[in-house]
Amino acid sequence: MSVRYTGTGAGIHLGSAVFWGVLFEALCGRRPTRTAVIGAAATTAVVAYIIDYHVVPKRVTPGYDVHMSKGSLGWTYVALAIGFAAVAMGRRHR
């Protein structure tokens, strides 16, 4: 662990979390239906995967693929979508 690499990695991770959150919220709209939330969550996860593994240079990819199988990597993005949808659905009931 080092300030240089850990700090940089944490900053990139935080930035990407905010970026994907903003995209998800923009896709949801102001008063989203359940279908809109699920669609926005799925779209955000797919776009995140495409950007992470097909758009950015290899040296700045998340690197999960080094430690996980392709199936497990897919479940990472499914979990991202479920997390977005679960929080948005919880917010709808408040």
Image (cartoon, rainbow, N blue to C red):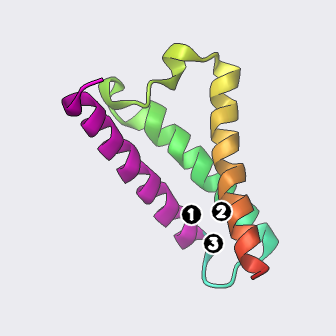
Q: Tell me which corner region of the image, top left, top right, bottom left or bottom right, holds residue 54.
A: top left
As for residue 73 lying within the magenta part, the answer is no
Kindly identify the amino acid type of the residue bearing the numbered disc 3.
Cys
Q: Decide: marks 1, 3 in contact (CB < 8 A)?
A: yes
At x 35% / y 24%, what residue is drawn?
58
In the depicted structure, whether residue 68 falls above or below residue 48 = above
Magenta-highlighted residues = 1-27
**Residue 1 position in % (x across, y down):** 30, 23
Mark 2 or mark 3, which has the lower sequence index?
Answer: 3
Q: Decide: marks 2, 1 in contact (CB < 8 A)?
A: yes
Mark 2 or mark 1, which has the lower sequence index?
Answer: 1
Number of other residues with Cα within 10 Å of mark 2, as a class: few under 14, some 14 to 19, many 20 or more? many
Kindly identify the amino acid type of the residue bearing the numbered disc 2.
Ala
Which type of secondary structure does the marked residue at label 3 adopt? helix
Number of other residues with Cα within 10 Å of mark 1, as a class: few under 14, some 14 to 19, many 20 or more? many
As measured in the structure, the alpha-carbon distance from the residue carrying label 1 to the one carrying label 3 is 6 Å
As measured in the structure, the alpha-carbon distance from the residue carrying label 2 to the one carrying label 1 is 6 Å
Which type of secondary structure does the marked residue at label 1 adopt? helix
Q: Is residue 17 left or right of residue 9?
A: right
Number of other residues with Cα within 10 Å of mark 3, as a class: few under 14, some 14 to 19, many 20 or more? many
At x 64% / y 35%, what residue is drawn?
76
At x 25% / y 37%, what residue is drawn?
8
In the depicted structure, whether residue 15 falls above or below residue 77 = below
Q: Decide: marks 2, 3 in contact (CB < 8 A)?
A: yes
Q: Which mark is residue 28?
A: 3
Instruction: Give the overall secondary structure of the magenta segment.
Output: helix
Kindly identify the amino acid type of the residue bearing the numbered disc 1.
Phe
Q: Is residue 88 left or right of residue 48?
A: right
Residue where numbered disc 2 is placed: 40
The quadrant of the rendering that contains the C terminus is: bottom right
Q: Which mark is residue 24?
A: 1
In the depicted structure, whether residue 85 falls above or below residue 13 = below
